[in-house]
Amino acid sequence: MAASCGVTFVDVLKALERISPFIHKTPIFTSEQANRKCGRQLFFKCENFQKSGSFKARGALNAVLKCQQVKPNVNGVVTHSSGNHGQALAWAAQRANLPCCVVVPQMAPDVKKNAIRGYGAELLECGPKPSDRNEACDKVQDDRNFELIPPYDHVDVIAGQGTIAVELLEQVPFLDAILVPISGGGMSSGICIAAKTIKPDIKIFIVAPKGKRLEECLRTGKRPWEGPPQYLDTIADGIRLQQTGYITTPILMELAEKDVFEMSDEEIIEGMKFSFERMKLVIETAAGASVAAAFSDRLRKMDPDLKNVGVILCGGNLDIENLPF
Amino acid sequence: MAASCGVTFVDVLKALERISPFIHKTPIFTSEQANRKCGRQLFFKCENFQKSGSFKARGALNAVLKCQQVKPNVNGVVTHSSGNHGQALAWAAQRANLPCCVVVPQMAPDVKKNAIRGYGAELLECGPKPSDRNEACDKVQDDRNFELIPPYDHVDVIAGQGTIAVELLEQVPFLDAILVPISGGGMSSGICIAAKTIKPDIKIFIVAPKGKRLEECLRTGKRPWEGPPQYLDTIADGIRLQQTGYITTPILMELAEKDVFEMSDEEIIEGMKFSFERMKLVIETAAGASVAAAFSDRLRKMDPDLKNVGVILCGGNLDIENLPF
């Protein structure tokens, strides 16, 4: 299963064994109101309660522990991210007693910088251009013998994120489909590999902001994006990257459903509001997109046999003093 | 234990048997960050996930089911409350297939009125004076043979709220103390009766907004409040009633600790923010007061042998479009 892409179900199981002493087996929440609104039974996987506040802790920790195992001489880990992956890698490195350096643009908000520092990582500020952060990362790798752990296009990161599906299908074995938000595709490709091995007829639906062009990609089997990576115009800052990765995309082409849910800002905000008001769960905008997909017309019109649907609430990190409602 | 006050531990156990098929056994959350901040181990009882969004579902449902049992000819239930008790009674009556009428002041916010209507209850609007709502309630009782279920000063309501402590001490048997927010005292007196019977040396600490004068009440054994009931000047709208009840107060005098935690608006807001940001839990202001008490200097200076402390997150109903931060 998907072994052609370099990540196998066995990798996911090994990842789970490696990280499970340190991460939360996050709970499943249900809501009668949500079921009525959707017309199906929804099962929310609460990665907002995960260590570091998002699912990213899984992939980051798996990559860090694997790196310690196969490259014992490495002096530390480095990445560039002011978002969830930066926090997660800082957390994971602290767990593994390995130095960590996170490259962030100077202009990143203080709240994010402080969260990364809070997990004991070194913060390295760089200029605003993508080339600035790459140069800074390269320098840390070369000068200090640190290993780069990228946010999604990395087999150990993908295998780590896949552990979500192993837990979810143990907790709710009778799922017919899973809704997964996407940015670079680390989580969705990991979930595809694990879920489609455990249960080959389960359907994995990807959820993205408007303008992703991933449906075109999955239907044609070709990357539709040209030029350098663009950011989408969306409120969901965790998933605004348009292009998916070079390791992740072939996995999605092989295993994900071709129907991609593209959600508008209004729908994403409504999804978040439902979670806050009705379920009492603080979720970030990307998770709001999952909820919105569960309540969408597109899902409503799909095969009624998809009775039990998993919804990944990918994280809960957001600036609560600037909520979009 | 506390049988003199008309509510016994057996009443609480009967309540639990009666309501447990319909309510959530709410989970316990922990937070390493909270433990570090407090210097003790904290165990948060998440009644924000309870049916109707607050612990009030327990007392309301127990009172409704007991009423159906002992007064089978009653045509319905009535109360006056635009807050959690109104929603909870509406929910409980719907569960019991009993008509429900909730008297609310005309000027109550639409969001609260809609929540009550959402559970299928009839909404009866009245004037702004306390006498207006009493008259409206009396009329429904007399004209339609509805039973009045008051928000706290009622033995079945108290017994229902006491079920929180039975669950909590089953989930965390080694607790040394519990922090409980108070308004009229239904929850705190119920928790006192149950917790002090199960574990006589546990300490129940009450948490209130500034100006409550409950510590004076508990230390002197006399009600310090004069004149008609007043509202406290606090952001915590669920617990702004100054006076505690006539059934609840003697129970508290007998069983609660004399030290009462009085929290300021700033502390309450900080408590809420911690819950939203770090624990990803939506809680209402009254629950923010509990969190604030856990982080207070007053608790910090107490007996270090109080190692394991329960914190009641009483509810999660609030206007998320108007958060105080």
Image (cartoon, coloured by chain):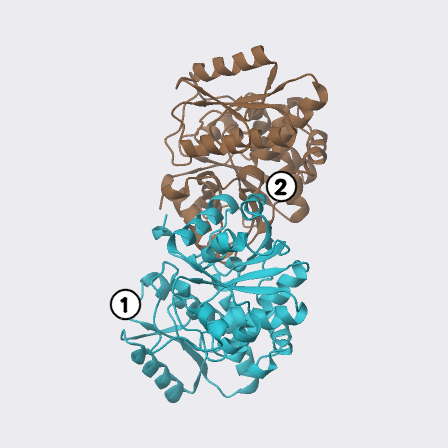
Chain colours: A cyan, B brown
Q: Position of residue B200 (x, y in %)?
A: 67, 38
Residue receiving disc 2: B202
Q: Secondary structure at mark 1?
A: loop
Q: Residues within 10 Å of mark 2 (few under 14, many from 20)?
A: many
Amino acid type for the residue under numbered disc 2: Ile
Q: Residues within 10 Å of mark 1 (few under 14, many from 20)?
A: few
Q: Position of residue A184 (x, y in %)?
A: 45, 72
Q: Name the one closer to the observer, B162 or A66.
A: A66
In this rendering, would B302 be left or right of B69?
A: left
Please determine whether, in this image, residue A277 is positioned above or below residue A105.
above
Q: Chain of mark 1?
A: A
Q: Which image quadrant: the N terminus of chain A?
A: bottom right
Question: Residue A163 bears which disc, if any?
Answer: none
Q: Is residue A90 visible?
A: no
Q: Which residue: 37% across, 88% down? A: A143
Q: Is residue A116 visible?
A: yes
Residue receiving disc 1: A107
